[in-house]
Image (cartoon, grey):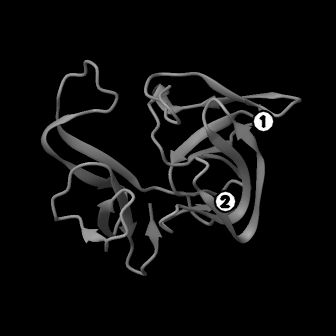
Amino acid sequence: MTGAALRQSHRLSLYDGRQDYPLLAREGEPWGDSPWVFIERGATGDRDWLTEGSARTKSAQVWVLATPDLTPRIGNGTCEALGILIDLNRTLYRISGEAELLTPQQDRYRIDSRADTESAETFAVVGDPVPQTLQQRTLHRGLPHIHTLDAEGRRQWRFLGNTAPWRESYQAAHGRLWLRLVDASGNRDF
């Protein structure tokens, strides 16, 4: 673990004082700085990793681990702060319905449970990676490309922590970025 991000394969669980809930991640993949979203799958009560960032799911409620700089804003639903995981420097929220988590720059992560459809948007960074030695994040030779999988719309980006206007995806960028998908009706997912 590095700060509030998981960089290697891992096994985590949440404990509510009565029961331990394993957090399952697909193939033990590393997680970044965006909110981590979990849903309950099956009769066992296990919380399964859904995505990192914005999410839309048919599940009745979701559990979100978010960094303390994010401020919840409740839409049509409830957002309950369940506690703080000190080792992860994250707050655990249980969200039912619609809520947003706002950054200090007023960028937002949209969380929607009880939705008609499931989130299907996935981003992939494609490029020539440098073999990992001491770096925590994947480094690429040259500029990698960001591909949107299973989604329609236009991609936009801006530098993390910057309030400059959003730029279209055909403009080159490097460093830490916010990335969003804007669909035909103007809805945005981060």
Q: What whole-number distance in Å separates the C-alpha atoms at marks 1 and 2?
A: 19 Å
Position of residue 36 relative to residue 85, above or below, is below
Position of residue 85 relative to residue 123, above or below, is above
Residue beneath the point at 49% across and 48% down: 34
Answer left or right for 160 relative to 111: left
Answer left or right for 39 relative to 166: right
Q: Which label was assigned to residue 68?
A: none
Residue beneath the point at 32% across and 71% down: 164
Could you say where residue 108 lies in the image, as x and y percent from the top left? Answer: 52, 65
Could you say where residue 97 lies in the image, as x and y percent from the top left? Answer: 71, 64
Q: Amino acid at mark 2?
A: Ser
Q: Residue furthest left?
A: 142
* Of 68 and 65, the residue lying toward us: 68
Q: Which label was assigned to residue 43?
A: 1
* Of 45 and 43, the residue lying toward us: 45
Q: Residues within 10 Å of mark 1 (few under 14, many from 20)?
A: few
Could you say where residue 105 lies in the image, as x and y percent from the top left? Answer: 47, 66
Task: Name the element at disc 2.
Answer: loop
Q: Amino acid at mark 1?
A: Ala
Task: Name the element at disc 1.
Answer: loop
Answer left or right for 3 relative to 89: left
